[in-house]
Image (cartoon, rainbow, N blue to C red):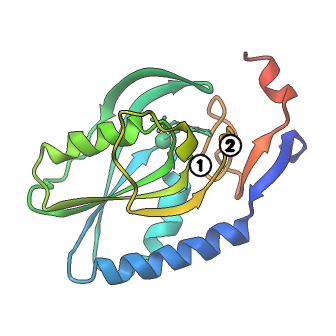
Amino acid sequence: MLDKIEKILISEEQLQQRIRELGAELTRDYADKNPIIVGVLKGVVIFYADMVKQIKVPCEMAFMTLRSYNGTESTGQIQVVQDVTADIKGRHVLILEDIFDTGKSLDFTYRHLMEREPASIKICTLLDKPSRRRPEITLQADYTGFTIDDLFVIGYGLDYDEYYRNLPFVGILKPEEYNSKE
Ligand code: 5GP
Ligand code: MG
C-alpha cells in the first residue's frame, strides 16, 4: 500500500501530538458538561477513537452516517443514512469530523442536529481546507487540527473509493493511482 503514496502530509506523530493538544482544550471546555460526542462516519472513525481518549470528561458517544461523495467528486446531495439515536435535547453536542472541505456536510449536520434543540453544538474537525469553502457556508469550526491546502488527502480515516482509511498518517496518492477511476 505504501508504494501508492506520493507524500506523507501529516505524520502519525504530528497527528497524535495535535490530538493531545486538542484533548487538553476540550477537557477544559467540557468539564461538567457531559457532552454527547457525535462522529460523522465513516471518515472520522480513526480520529474519533484517538480523540475521545484525550477528552478526559464523562461523555456519551454517538454516530451518524451521511452519504454525499462519490470518488473525489461531490454530488451535492446529502442524505442521512443512519441518524443519532440518543436524545440530544438540552445536551451539549460536540461534532467530530474528519475534514471541513466545501462545508456542505458539516453545515447539513449542524442544521440537522440543531432541529433537535441541543443546549449547544460545537465542531471539532481534524482537517480544514478553507480555500474550498462554498461562499454560502458561514459555519466555522470551533476546534481545528490542521489547516491544509486544496489537496485530495487520504489516510487516517479518509478514503479514495473506500480504500486507504487504515493508513496511520494523512498523505496524498501518486497521480497515476487516480487514472483508472477518472
Ligand atoms: P464537504 O461537504 O465539506 O465538501 O466534504 C466533506 C466530506 O467530503 C468529508 O467528510 C470527506 O468524506 C469528503 N472529502 C472532502 N475532502 C476530502 C479529501 O481531501 N480527501 C478525502 N478522502 N475525502 C474528502
Ligand atoms: Mg466525512
Q: Which residue is mark 1?
A: 157
Q: Is mark 2 within 8 Å of ligand 1?
A: yes
The Cα atoms of the two marked residues, 2 and 1, are separated by 10 Å
Q: Quadrant of the C terminus?
A: top right
Type of amino acid under label 2: Val
User: As drawn, is 17 to the left or to the right of 122?
Assistant: right
Q: Is residue 54 visible?
A: no
What residue appears at the point 67 percent right and 38 percent down from the top-left corner? 152
Q: Position of residue 128 (x, y in %)?
A: 54, 51
Q: Nearer the viewer, mark 2 or mark 1?
A: 2
Q: Position of residue 67 (x, y in %)?
A: 42, 28
Q: Which residue is mark 2?
A: 153
Badge 1 crowding class, 10 Å Cα cut-off, few under 14, some 14 to 19, many 20 or more, is many
SS at badge 2: loop
Ligand 1 falls in quadrant: top right
Q: Is residue 141 above or below residue 16?
A: above
Q: 66 or 14, which lies in front?
A: 14
Q: Looking at the rendering, which quadrant does residue 26 occupy?
A: bottom left
